[in-house]
Image: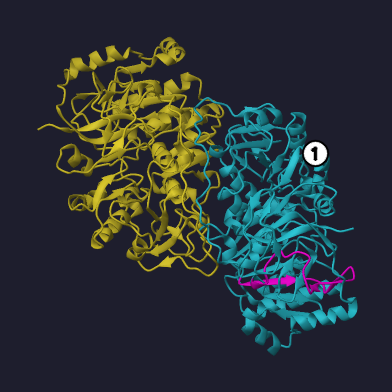
Chain colours: A cyan, B yellow
Amino acid sequence: MVKNSLGRMIPEYFNGQLLSPYRDPFGHLPQGRLATRALRRVNPGERKLLGSLREAILAAELKDGMCISTHHHLRNGDTLLGAVVRELDAMGLRDIRIASSSIHPVHAELIPYIEKGVIGGFECGVNGPIGELVSRGELKCPIVVRTHGGRARAIISGQVQIDAAFIAAPCCDSYGNMNGAQGPSACGSLGYAHPDALYAKTVIAVTDNLVPYPATPISIPQTLVDYVVQVESLGDPQKIVSTTTRITRDPVGLQIAKYAAQVIEISGLLKDGFSFQTGSGGISLAVADQVKQKMRQQGIKGSFGCGGITGYFVDMLEEGLFQTLFDVQCFDLQAVASIGRNANHLEISADMYANPFNAGAVVNQLDCVILGATEVDINFNVNVNTESNGLLLHNTGGHSDTAAGAKLAIITAPSIRGRLPIVRDELTTVTTPGETIDVIITERGIAVNEQQGELKKELLRRKLPVKEIGALQQEIYAVTGRPRPLEFSDEVVALIEYRDGTIIDVVRKIKG
Amino acid sequence: MVKNSLGRMIPEYFNGQLLSPYRDPFGHLPQGRLATRALRRVNPGERKLLGSLREAILAAELKDGMCISTHHHLRNGDTLLGAVVRELDAMGLRDIRIASSSIHPVHAELIPYIEKGVIGGFECGVNGPIGELVSRGELKCPIVVRTHGGRARAIISGQVQIDAAFIAAPCCDSYGNMNGAQGPSACGSLGYAHPDALYAKTVIAVTDNLVPYPATPISIPQTLVDYVVQVESLGDPQKIVSTTTRITRDPVGLQIAKYAAQVIEISGLLKDGFSFQTGSGGISLAVADQVKQKMRQQGIKGSFGCGGITGYFVDMLEEGLFQTLFDVQCFDLQAVASIGRNANHLEISADMYANPFNAGAVVNQLDCVILGATEVDINFNVNVNTESNGLLLHNTGGHSDTAAGAKLAIITAPSIRGRLPIVRDELTTVTTPGETIDVIITERGIAVNEQQGELKKELLRRKLPVKEIGALQQEIYAVTGRPRPLEFSDEVVALIEYRDGTIIDVVRKIKG
């Protein structure tokens, strides 16, 4: 057990893997080389189309203890991962690791297969009940939570070796060219699946929309795809939208959004060439809306919007407020429709989006990102993985990646949620290091990190409610009281891996 | 010295490299793994823009004996390779191997640098004077001629390790995103440069058109590019067009084209979904024109045209005769204009176009290709590298790749050129194995390879002038006489590498 630089106790090993404790956001340099894989040869006349998932599993020669992946672009509408796991079970396979890009509440259907030993662990974060049960000690299943960029890094560096990638392909030809823009299960970008397609030992395209050769546009090309399987359905794209996708009407949220837009304007970044990312929550969208109005009023032409893309960003593209959208994931059906039709709405891979170990990801070019938090501390460290009840409920997504990349990383959050204070003495879990967070905005005031001294001065000059984060915390505690620390057992049930592969924190089983 | 399966004498070693003699077109299976390279880390705020080619050469830490590459999309208009070599010389570097995608007559400017020892060899075929001088023994410079697909294979398998790729980028931002569609040196597709960008140790984008971030569309992304250098000019795109690009008016050529179009029609391939490749020569274009008319008359909707793309194929795309163009290289400025504007005109990498060692290249899906020849023999083997005078004058291009991939590979050539017969007892050089050639068409008759027995019957039934190839040869010899064999010394000056990396032939120094 060693303390990392943020004071979190990190075990030496987890699930047999030697851990490297987190030190700082930018200093950890890669030592190794790009992953590799066996060369293949596919001669003219050879066919890739197989009759079923079972045939594909056989062709991939999957065995006990191996690792598979899917992508999560259909989010809570995905039915492929469940179908693959049921087939693995029916074939008697056990101890399979899941290295999907994310797991959603719909995948609660996997719980019986974890209990049965079909699934031996998750090489990815989990949203929803699986993490909750693991946190409570009711389910034994090691979890390694990675950022979107960190997952790409883990795959391209060979840290995670995927034996078979099952890629849901909403539009696919029989030679494996695919895109996500067309078909009954259209999900738009297939960005998270690109590293899998490049490095998995066997790549299987699974489609409910087999089209004549060539399927175009081509997101993932035939040169990377070993087999194609046709299924009835990949899932329900209506369920891509799983969070709020309307501007908040809550006055607290609107106040926070107003402050955030003011901070962005005062930062000096809001000018021609501005680049921006927000999530799809109600406050984020309210910030986007205010920024949009400021850009429109001031005649500002932005360069790009990126990340998970919503209809709000599509509108901004179409209005000329952005030149380009870099889309690793479509967050709603308006984004899905746009990516298939607008040449300036570009699909990018998770590697290009956020991997710290390439020649420069898109997040490095980002001016401003709006992010959320379940908790923050007075060093600006942020938790998005666990709730204050200690339960692992959320994947990291691009949180740490965009915070590290953006010139201005803003956390927006209500000061109190469910009677609990947002600013804590100690975080339940550290997801994103405070060094990479610039501003924390609540309805009670704005805390500015020390590296943004000039911005702080300017905000004060413009009479924004800037507060020292300690003072903000005390003000909130005066309402909520100081929360009682949670009690955890010693048992580590999940790792929180920072984007560079070091361990920023672990999740321990809760007591009681 | 061993005889390969086509009876060509192959030395054990060339230039220190152990050779593997050619055996058959499809049986050689890859043993190794995908190439790899050191992982990198580029943090936010780091810049890639350097002040000069010299700074880039220093940053790449180029040393004597290392290997560099450029791409040849500007063909005879390229000025970058010359500029890089002059700088290498000025910096005192020696024995540098050139692994460009092709060399053109303009690169005669490199000859003094070969003589001086700056250039130590070519890991690529050469069009024009360098090959001639090497064939004559007037220039010492080992040459390894590769097909377009074979070059991609050599790079992705690590056989050729490029230390620094200098990628001419007609449109580029300061973070390295680039395309070939825009700018004063627009050349369209950058398809041949993709493997270099993926696997070169250092990747340098060189541009005469630096645009604000992000340059879109993105052919090669920022994640692969280490440095960006701005130069005055990359060259002259007017000189992309270096061969005939008009339909031949020669009656012999027109007769050949007419036969070719009839053969395609009779083969049964000319139906909905038809896919097609031709070169840019006058006969090829005449075939394309006749095929176009047949498709139009019969209401046939083709699937794709591929390869080097000409305005003729662009017209066919725009007319709906093809659904898609797969473009590894634009052969004229009409193609350049189209790729930037038509979403169905897709840039593809050389890997996707023709590499035999991936999960299936585009050539594998090709119905019909029209190819040329300097010589053929009675086993349907084809020479495109040397002329009958023994001089190495031509690169292989996609010849062997498309012949291997296409269902119907047709050679079109006049029976007599410069008083020399096209059908020889023995080829000066074997480029493409006869097993992969289906039909040879001259104005004197059509020779059909034995694997196309059904087609032969049908051509005879339709009264086309089908002849046994031996008979056709004798008929031609009756006019030209049997040519005297050339005399060669024992010295091997160049390898002709088949697409799978085995050696199909060598070029020896001519005597006299």
Residue range highlighted in magenta: A407-435
Which residue occupies 68% across, 41% down? A170
* SS assignment at label 1: helix
Residue A441: horizontal and vertical position, in percent? 75, 76
Residue B336: horizontal and vertical position, in percent? 44, 49
Q: Check the picture and name the quadrant holding the N terminus of chain B.
A: top left
Specify the quadrant of the image occupied by residue B132: top left
Specify the quadrant of the image occupied by residue A260: bottom right
Q: Is B172 displayed left or right of A283 in the figure?
A: left
Outermost residue on the front side: it is A1
Residue A168 visible to the viewer:
no
Q: Residues within 10 Å of mark 1 (few under 14, many from 20)?
A: some
Label count reads: 1
Relative vertical location of residue A20 with respect to residue B14 in this rendering, above or below:
below
Residue A145 visible to the viewer:
yes
The chain that hosts pointer 1 is A
Q: Quick check: is B314 in the magenta stretch?
A: no
Tell which of B134 and B483 is nearer to you. Answer: B134
Residue at image mark 1: A113
Which residue occupies 29% across, 27% down? B430
Which residue occupies 81% across, 51% down? A134
Relative vertical location of residue B384 with respect to residue B463 in this rendering, above or below:
below
Q: Check the picture and name the quadrant holding the C terminus of chain B.
A: top left
Q: Is A394 displayed left or right of B79 in the figure?
A: right
Residue A28: horizontal and vertical position, in percent? 56, 63
Tell which of A118 and B7 is nearer to you. Answer: A118
Tell which of A335 and A367 is nearer to you. Answer: A367
Q: Quick check: is A419 in the magenta stretch?
A: yes
**Amino acid on which the number 1 mark rests in the picture:** Tyr
Residue B286: horizontal and vertical position, in percent? 38, 32
